[in-house]
Image (spheres, coloured by chain):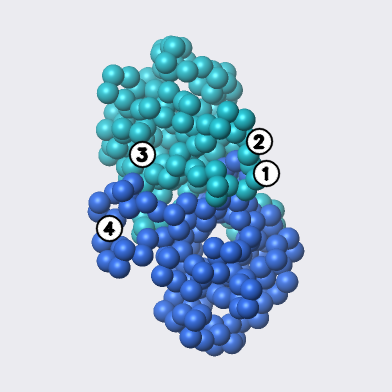
Chain colours: A cyan, B blue
């Protein structure tokens, strides 16, 4: 993404996603947070949409498959430690909120809570999902899936977005 | 998308997409251009990615199903006339390039040409597609599909992006 002065804010968003963001999903018994480094944003179905991707092997996958919402937080401070922890440990084994000292605040528009840390927050209502079909994936991306645990792509309508 | 000063450029991108952009796809015998009002952008598979959506009923769908690239142009001037034409007429019936007075310039990185008009251009290599499964679509979006011609979602790796 070069030579595109007009959309500098867009590149900033992409950079921030790559540096690591947090995806929160509320399950019946547990609310979990995981690190994401991938996301898409834009307009689909005449709605502002954010897309996130979760591997079928993840604990979050179990939760998000039954969820009707999710929230995403792009932290504004240095959160390397928490990003590493939430990207390497599974919510099956520990409470990552407790481990990171994170609180979950009530969301404005969706049932899933939002991370109570300074940053940019997106509250999303689940409106579509698409399991990755490896038949339709470029062969050079296969090396991202040595365990064949392809992502499911989740599309959320952004019902609220704000900075804290 | 309110209260998010940090990503004003992002909101600008979303607004520009909604106002109408052009999707160019090169078929074996014909290169076609259609209007799009939906797109997602961000990072997936460790790559900058743009996602576009094409209904199965469209002439462009026939072409893009066999294509290994596509280009997207967000025009910078007033292109209401061309946006209306490329959104309402089918490439089956007429040459929309000729009709709009558009030229197709050689792309920098992909086989599909790029629209030769002032604007922001994205050259994308096809890396994934996902046909919409209506089972996984929120019921309130069904009214966008009275003819059941669901979109296929096409994911392109952005190999070049620039303004002219």
Q: Residue farthest to the front? A: A135
Instruction: Tell me the distance, in whole angstroms, between the alpha carbons under discs 4 and 3.
Output: 22 Å
Instruction: Tell me the distance, in whole angstroms, between the alpha carbons under discs 2 and 1.
Output: 7 Å
What label sits on residue A123 in the rendered view? 3
Same subunit, tags 2 and 3:
yes
- Nearer-N-terminus badge (3/1): 3
Mark 4 lies on residue: B142
- Kindly check if marks 3 and 1 are in contact, taking CB atoms under 8 A apart as contact: no
At horizontal 39% and vertical 23% (from top left) the residue drawn is A32
Same subunit, tags 3 and 1:
yes
Mark 2 lies on residue: A143
Q: Which of marks 4 and 2 is in front?
A: 2
Q: In this rendering, would A96 be left or right of B158?
A: left
Q: In this rendering, would B33 be left or right of B109?
A: left
Measuring from the top left, give residue B143's x and y in whole percent.
26, 61
Mark 1 lies on residue: A140
């Amino acid at each position: 993404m070069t030579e595109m002065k007009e959309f500098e804010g867009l590149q900033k968003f992409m950079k921030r996603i790559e540096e690591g963001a947090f995806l929160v999903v509320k399950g019946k018994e547990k609310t979990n947070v995981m690190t994401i480094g991938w996301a898409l944003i834009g307009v689909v179905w005449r709605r502002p949409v954010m897309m996130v991707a979760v591997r079928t092997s993840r604990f979050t996958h179990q939760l998000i498959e039954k969820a009707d919402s999710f929230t995403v937080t792009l932290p504004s401070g240095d959160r390397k430690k928490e990003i590493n922890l939430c990207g390497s440990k599974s919510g099956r084994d520990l409470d990552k909120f407790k481990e990171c000292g994170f609180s979950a605040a009530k969301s404005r528009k969706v049932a899933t809570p939002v991370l109570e840390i300074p940053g940019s927050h997106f509250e999303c209502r689940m409106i579509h999902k698409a399991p990755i079909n490896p038949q339709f994936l470029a062969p050079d991306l296969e090396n991202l899936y040595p365990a064949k645990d392809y992502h499911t792509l989740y599309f959320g309508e952004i019902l609220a977005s704000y900075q804290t």
